[in-house]
Image (cartoon, rainbow, N blue to C red):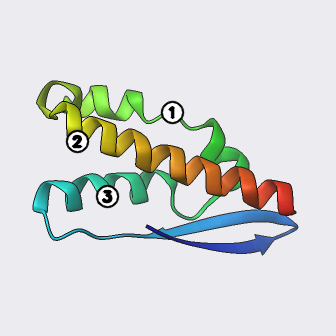
Amino acid sequence: LETHIARESGEPVLTFLGDSDAHIVRGLVYLMLALYSGRPAHEIIATDPQPLFAKLGLDAHLTPQRSNGVRSMVERIKADARAALAAA
């Protein structure tokens, strides 16, 4: 996962890039990028991905290992947003 930070009107806006060789993981990365990329840091921190996962039925179809990987990715994204806010 690669993070880029831009300052628009003083507030950090984060853009994320990511990919994977595994098709399922690539799809999960895409979902996280669609949900979080290009948004202000405070929105990223406040956004919970669980409603999206529930709506798509992902919780029922992901292995525990993949679920942990997604949680780690979300935590990394939110940590980058918190760091961008702290530096602002």
Give the spatial CA distance, label 3 vs label 2. 11 Å
Q: Amino acid at mark 1?
A: Asp
Q: Indicate the position of residue 5 as horizontal and vertical percent values.
A: 67, 72
Q: Residues within 10 Å of mark 2 (few under 14, many from 20)?
A: some
Residue found 42% across the figure and 44% down from its top: 72
- Label 2, on which residue? 66
Q: Amino acid at mark 2?
A: Arg
**Disc number lying in front (3 or 2):** 2
Q: Give above or below for 58 relative to 72.
A: above
Q: Are marks 2 and 1 in contact (CB under 8 Å)?
A: no
Q: Residues within 10 Å of mark 3 (few under 14, many from 20)?
A: many
Task: Please state, as top left, top right, bottom left or bottom right, where the C terminus lies in the image.
Answer: bottom right
- Label 3, on which residue? 29
- Label 1, on which residue? 48
SS of the residue at dot 2?
helix
Q: Are marks 3 and 2 in contact (CB under 8 Å)?
A: no
Q: Give above or below for 26 relative to 19.
A: above
